Amino acid sequence: MSFQSLGFVLFFPCCCLVYYCLPRRMRPAWLLAASYFFYLCCGVGFAALLAVVTLASYLLGRALGCARTRRGRRLLLAAGVAGAAGILAVFKYAGFALQAAADLLHLFGITVAPPAFSLALPVGLSFYTFQVIGYLADVYRGNLAPERSLLRYGLFVSFFAHILSGPIARGSQLLPQLEHPAPFDAAGVRDGLLLMLWGCFEKLVVADRAGLVVDTVFGGYAAYGGTERLLAAVLYAVQLYADFAGYSHIAQGAAGVLGIRLADNFRQPYLAQTVREFWGRWHISLSSWLRDYIYIPLGGSRRGRLRQYVNLMVTFLVSGLWHGAAWHFVFWGGLHAVYQIAGRLTAPLRTRINLGQGLLPRWARRLVTFGLVTVAWVFFRADSVHQALSYLGGIAGWPDPWVFTNGTLLGLGLDGWGWFVLFCAVLLLVGVDCLHERGIRLRPVLARQPAAYRWIVYYAAAAAVLVFGIWGPGYAAANFVYFQF
């Protein structure tokens, strides 16, 4: 069951209605049952695996709280991390590892056919295993007391709003909210529904419409010139952002309707002025997880410049591999590590240029950062490193500006009206991000307006999503991009 499915349209109001009709002490139990029903729609076997991971990590967390020796605590943490990572490795990386081993042997003249190994990847596995590992690490460090209630811990892991694609919740942020459910708050419900509506706009109007062009060009890129490829690469950056930010906003809004606050996952990432700043704004729950549980434990920046660069490379390679069992994802992660290292090496020079002579204004730094990130996204979207390099090689050719006037764009998956809607939608998305960057939040501004005006805006926004969103066979049931991770 995905957020844009008819099933969710029926499930969510029923879930909320029963939730608020129940006494507050019974609400976590109902929400746990509803979350497992939600996840059962993805597959019974997947739900069974989720229950096993939940129970095992709960018991390990309790054991960590009772362990008295440092060695015992380390063994328990190692067992928990190895177990969660091992499950992820079996389902997601076994086939990739076997093929990589066969390729390595081939370099030494040994030809081995790797055995066929393919398992259906449980939806959300990458997210909830990282959440479990983070919980165990926090208990081990003493930053979080082990959760005593199996019911609340099970809800922490399986909560339907974030189980499929995050945000990756922290125990210190979510567990207290589950222990003390918030009372019904009309303003919170309103804000949650508005955030869900904005997420639907991002997903259905922006991301899915941009995806039509992206799929067309990337699917047959050899037939297109540099301008079309560049346009598709930029639109893929837009699609990925609108798709995943849209999911995150729907998740946050759905949780907000229930009085639960999930952490922000995006903060105007394409307005970042450096790649380092970009990673502080993009998929924040994952980037902060990688920082706290991989980069810092490796030594962070505390052990010299060379060790810091090695730690950065390891962290981003893990990030790339987490996104997919393929070399082009690994290359994407490594490329971002190179960006980070180069940024640190050139920081003194860039500081002198920016502050001393003012040669690079803020808009130029943002444009350069967006360009670097977009180049990396090509490796993320392509099927292989070779395909990504070939795609980028075509962009490097002499651009043909006439594609914007000779009708070529009409063969890229959208008609003239579709391009107009996409342009206006992207312009609105950029405008809202610019306002948020200046600290102007639209929901509080709207809440201060007269009721009649507010309802006109609400109905107009809902109608825009219904009219301009991508619906119909093959689209209404399409999953969010990040479901595959």
Image (cartoon, grey):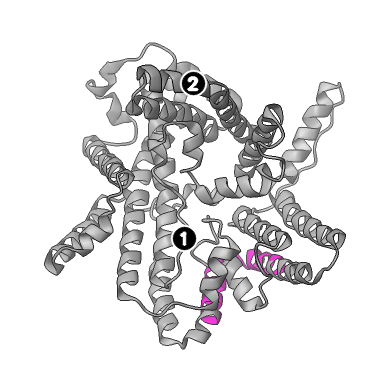
> Which stretch did the figure color magenta?
29-53
Question: Residue at horizontal 68%, vertical 37%?
Answer: 302
Q: Residue furthest front?
A: 356
Name the one closer to the observer, 232 or 184: 184
Q: Quadrant of residue 157?
A: bottom right
Image quarter of residue 192: bottom left
Number of residues whose C-alpha sits closer than 10 Å to that of mark 1, classed few (under 14), some (14–19) or many (20 or more) = many
Where does label 1 land, which residue?
2
Mark 2 belongs to which amino acid?
Answer: Leu
186 w.r.t. 201: above or below? below
Q: CA distance from mark 1 to mark 2?
A: 33 Å
Residue 309, percent from left and from top: 66, 30
Residue drawn where x is 44% and y is 15% of the image: 396
Q: Quadrant of residue 308?
A: top right
Residue with the most extreme bottom position? 23
Q: Which residue is mark 2?
A: 392
Residue 225 seen in the current view:
no
Toward the viewer: 176 or 468?
A: 176
